[in-house]
Every structure is written in structure tokens, then in C-alpha cells.
Image (spheres, rainbow, N blue to C red):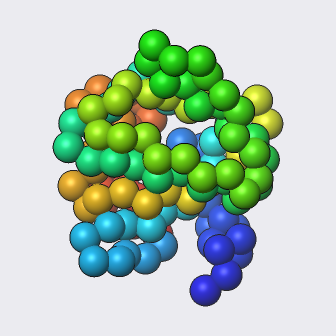
Amino acid sequence: MNLKEKFSNVDQYFSPKIIDEVNDQYIKVAKIKGQEVPWHNHENEDELFYIVDGELLMEIENESSFTMKKGDLFVVKKGVNHRVSSVEECSIMLIESKTTEHTGKVKSNITKSIEEQTY
């Protein structure tokens, strides 16, 4: 599969799409633009972010925020409050456990169920 081609079917921001799986992990792609992602955490799961294109502002509670750029990778450890945003469109790949809830226990207008994340 070509990772960049998978983004052609992602037509909504903040709506991850599962493109494959490895053992107990989903591989997802998403487009981010704006500041809709609420502060949240994943109590029992780490979450890997990989920037395919664009720039992503990563905010970690009680730490300095930082901008991730194309090619950057970052793992948010379980239980860590975080949120992401982007001024311009940003394409990301996520790797997360199949049990990971989209916005943790925080429900918002962008929260998607696993069924809604099916490619």
C-alpha cells in the first residue's frame, strides 16, 4: 500500500481511518486542521503520531508545546493528557492499540467510534 494514497479517502478532519492492523494495533491515517481535538488521555494505551505531511502542534499537559513536522514521530505515553491542532492541513499516521478510544473518556463533537473509523 502507498501511505500517501490512503489520504485521498479521508474527507473529514479529526476523523481517523483504520488502514491496517498489526497484532493488537490499528494503523490509522487522519487529517488535522483547526483546534477541535479536546484535552484527553488514553488511560491504558500509548499512542504513536507520525507526520506524513504538514505541521502539527503537540500539547502535553504541564510541558512546553512543540511543533511536529513532516517525518517526525512522537509517542504519547498512556495516561498523559494531550491535544493536537494544526493551522494548515496536516496528514498524520497513528498507531494505537485496538482498545484506544478516539478522544479517551472525553466525548466531543469530533469523537468517533471504531466503527466510524473503518476505512
Q: Is residue 63 visible?
A: yes
Q: Residue at x 35, y 77 (%)?
A: 22
User: Residue 63 versus residue 111: which sits nearer the camera?
Assistant: 63
Q: Is residue 10 above or below residue 41?
A: below
Q: Residue at x 59, y 31 (%)?
A: 58
Whole-percent x and y of residue 1?
61, 86
Image quadrant in which you'd find residue 87:
top right
Residue displayed at 25% across by 70% down: 24
Which residue sits furthest front?
Answer: 63
Where is residue 78? Give x, y as percent. 29, 40
Looking at the image, which residue sits at the far top? Answer: 62
Q: Is residue 91 above or below residue 84?
A: below
Which residue is at the far bottom? 1
The answer to whether residue 88 is above or below residue 54 is: above
Residue 47: % across, % down: 40, 49
Q: In the rendered view, does 107 fall on the left or right side of 90?
A: left
Judged left or right of residue 119, residue 13 is right
Which residue does the image show at 56% across and 59% down from the upper left?
Answer: 93
Q: How many marks?
A: 0
Would residue 15 be seen by someone viewing this image from the given angle? no
Relative depth, front residue between 106 and 11: 106
Q: What percent of the width, then of the height, locates residue 62?
A: 45, 13
